[in-house]
Image (cartoon, rainbow, N blue to C red):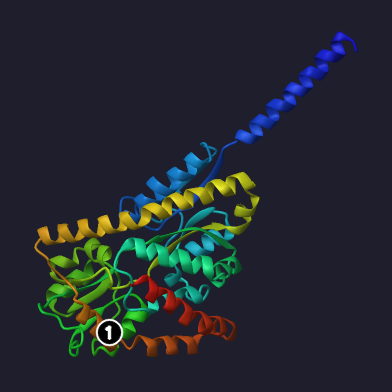
Amino acid sequence: MSLTAFVSRLLAVFALFIMLLSTASAEIVLRYTDHEPYGNMRTRAINEIFFAAIEKESSGRIRIDAHWGGELSTSYNALRTIQEGKMADIGIVVPEYTPQQLPLLQMFKSFPTGPDNGEKQVRFFSQVFNEFPEFNAELAHNNLVNLQFFLGYPAAFFSTAPNLALNALRGTTWRTASFWHQAYLENAGARVIKMPWDEQITQALRAGTLNGLLVNLDSGDDIKAQQAAKHILFSQRLWLGHVYLLAMNKQRWESLSKEDKTAIQRAGKTTLAALGPTLDHSVNSMVENMRKEGAQVSLLTPDALRSWQEVSRFQQEQDNWLATLDKKSAVDARRLLPLVASRLEEAMR
């Protein structure tokens, strides 16, 4: 072989090596959408724990281009946005906002009480998603793959009157978002009205046209509801069942290499270990801050929680919900509901 031919072949091999090295180390950018502004417990956990772990596990190969505060999509349009995969590759999908597309995932909010700490909640959702493939299949049917779930704060009763008895709400007017909680309050004798989630609610509480809210603790704090409804009944066991799914466009997921998928899955395991303690610390800090602001935050007793379970008539509402589902969803839901209830009871022990 001549020297010229040898050099040419050597250069070709070197060029191929550089090309392969460049391909292997090419940065993958995933555009993320979130309807909430950055800075609360959930958004910080996503960014500082999950996204940081993805970057670490992928040795910097995967980068998240995060857009917060509804910059790319609102909460109610997030499923479609990620489903289409044009504006965003990944983002937060809240099942409650798309009940027609995600009927089975409404099930979690149908229970009035749940585990008493974050670690047990994480264990419950991990078990359910791992054990029952129907939930992930429902996402796949919508062209989504769930990468990780995140949790919200527990629910609380914000009342304008002291000494609230949950089995004596007749004659009072309340606002809540979930169709489950609307039914529970009505079953307890309350009148439920619909209002936009903004400062109008706090004004209505001050005016006396609204007697209380049943809402997650942090949402109440967002509008400073405790300034007008300073009597707050709260418990970690006052179950909200509000799960935030960090989902990815299915085609985008399938386009990733096995190595990149594994890196994201390892990041998920790191995140799961941190979620429970993060939630508990944040809840305790928020309750402490509310008390410093003058709110009267009382913990619901076991007897009060049992009373709420009874007056909510949640099992009746679960039956009503099953009757509204189409045939396919109803078959799956009727089989899954008692199984999920059993896992929830185990998590509460």
Q: Nearer the viewer, residue 304 or 207?
A: 304
From what the image shows, is residue 190 above or below residue 150? below
Q: Which residue is mark 1?
A: 185
Q: Is residue 172 above or below residue 103?
A: below
At horizontal 14% and vertical 80% (from top left) the residue drawn is 164
Image point (51%, 85%), residue name: 334
Looking at the rendering, which quadrant does residue 18 occupy? top right
Give the SS element for disc 1: helix
Residue at (23, 87) in percent of width and height: 190
Task: Specify whether 41 is left or right of 333.
Answer: left
* Residue 237 appears left or right of 319: left
User: For the C terminus, which image quadrant?
Assistant: bottom left
Question: Tag 1: residue type?
Answer: Leu
Question: Residue 193 appears at what percent x and percent y?
Answer: 27, 82
Give the left or right position of residue 302, taking residue 14 as reference: left
Quarter of the image that includes the N terminus: top right
Residue 183 position in % (x across, y down): 33, 85
Asked where in the image residue 346 lies, by quadrant, the reply is: bottom left
In the rendered view, does 111 fall on the left or right side of 190? Answer: right
State whether residue 309 is above or below residue 62: below
In x, y percent, where is residue 209? 17, 80
- How many neighbours does mark 1 have within 10 angstroms: few (below 14), some (14-19), or many (20 or more)? many
